[in-house]
């Protein structure tokens, strides 16, 4: 029996520590404060595509609600800190997502998230690229940077305008490329399938790709901007075909954010998924949230890319099966 042993080598765990040191030095040099926020919360993530772990607290009732949710991101409490005047800040910590286990997924994983006051998503993407390029140069793996819009990417890769194409055209594009039952799939499902199955696999291994300005329907917690058509001021960053980061020009309109949460809960109810309470403290804080941009980066996937590994178990001390 060797299940007590680490799933990653001691050498790779030491390298992870060096990467964390690089990240902390990067932010210290820029005056960005490291903070810690709760792992358990009374409000949960309403995103229909993310499932949360739910726990029951058994202590004194003065502690508040007994049902608690393991965080899927530190986003909500970090925004509350920003609303309270903390200024530029970041956190490195564990997050949890139920049902996600595989070669590139672990239900418990490490996330870096940071926020810059007075910045938009474009400026923040530039800083994220600077951080990543430094890490990959140190690892002896220089990267070519490609910066493109979601719309331009689809047009160049598969000849489709993702903002104006009809649902029928998108469905035909998926059917011609992927063997899948299209019944019940919505427009964003079709776009996601085209991105993940027809476009992402073509990203070169040594390329860092920044995709900006997503369809308005994929706004999540990002601001919208009205161009020819509305777009969400958010971006994603890939190294090769691996998605590493997701960033927003953060929405600070409490009424609009509540509407989006309510829509999420309707979709969750329709699919039979558990519906966590909306985070009312976050909604209250949005009234004073300064204009800012934020980004979440998966550190375990980052380690996969830096080390050239293929299995999540190879870059964490103990993966889910050995925890």
Image (cartoon, helix red, strand yellow):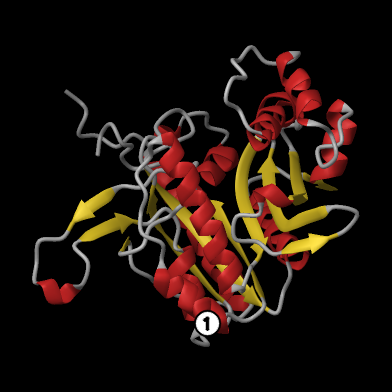
Res. 158 image quadrant? top right
Q: Position of residue 74 (x, y in %)?
A: 44, 63
Res. 305 image quadrant? top right
Residue at 66%, 54% in the rendered image: 219
Residue at 58%, 78% in the rendered image: 88
Q: Position of residue 122 (x, y in %)?
A: 77, 63
Residue 83 visible within the image = yes
Relative horizontal placement of residue 250, taking residue 83 as reference (left or right): right
Dividing the image into 4 quarters, which one contains the C terminus? top left
Q: Mark 1, residues whose alpha carbon is within 10 Å: few (<14), some, or many (≥20)?
A: many
Relative horizontal placement of residue 39, taking residue 214 as reference (left or right): left
Res. 165 image quadrant? top right
Relative horizontal placement of residue 315, taking residue 223 as reference (left or right): left
Residue 50 visible within the image = no
Dividing the image into 4 quarters, which one contains the N terminus? top left
258 or 133: which is nearer to us? 258
Judged from this view, the residue extending furthest toward the bottom is 85
156 or 135: which is nearer to us? 156
Q: Position of residue 96 (x, y in %)?
A: 37, 49
Q: Which residue is mark 1?
A: 83
Residue at 52%, 68% in the rendered image: 24
Residue at 68%, 34% in the rendered image: 187
Q: Is residue 8 above or below residue 201?
A: below
């Amino acid at each position: 029996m060797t299940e007590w042993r680490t799933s990653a080598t001691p050498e790779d765990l030491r390298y992870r520590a060096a990467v964390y040191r690089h990240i902390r030095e990067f932010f210290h040099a820029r005056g960005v404060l490291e903070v810690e926020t709760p792992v358990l919360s009374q409000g949960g993530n309403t995103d229909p595509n993310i499932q949360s772990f739910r726990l029951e607290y058994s202590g004194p009732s003065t502690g508040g609600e007994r049902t608690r949710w393991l965080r899927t991101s530190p986003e909500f409490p970090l925004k509350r800190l920003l609303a309270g005047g903390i200024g530029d800040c970041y956190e490195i910590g564990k997050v949890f997502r139920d049902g996600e286990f595989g070669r590139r997924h672990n239900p418990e994983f490490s996330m870096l998230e940071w926020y810059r006051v007075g910045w938009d998503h474009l400026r923040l993407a530039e800083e994220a690229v600077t951080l990543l390029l430094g890490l990959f140069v140190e690892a002896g793996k220089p990267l070519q940077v490609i910066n493109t819009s979601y719309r331009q990417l689809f047009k160049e890769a598969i000849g489709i305008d993702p903002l104006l194409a009809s649902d029928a055209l998108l469905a035909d594009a998926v059917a011609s490329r992927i063997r899948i039952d299209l019944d019940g799939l919505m427009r964003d499902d079709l776009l996601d399938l085209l991105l993940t199955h027809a476009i992402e696999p073509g990203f070169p291994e040594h390329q860092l790709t920044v995709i900006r300005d997503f369809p308005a329907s994929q706004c999540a917690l990002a601001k919208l901007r009205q161009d020819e058509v509305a777009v969400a001021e958010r971006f994603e960053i890939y190294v090769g075909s691996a998605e590493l980061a997701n960033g927003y020009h953060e929405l600070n309109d409490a009424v609009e954010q509540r509407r989006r949460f309510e829509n999420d809960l309707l979709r969750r109810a329709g699919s039979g998924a558990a519906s966590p309470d909306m985070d009312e403290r976050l909604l209250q804080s949005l009234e004073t949230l300064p204009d800012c941009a934020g980004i979440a980066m998966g550190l375990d996937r980052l380690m996969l890319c830096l080390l050239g590994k293929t299995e999540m178990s190879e870059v964490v001390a103990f993966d889910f099966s050995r925890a």
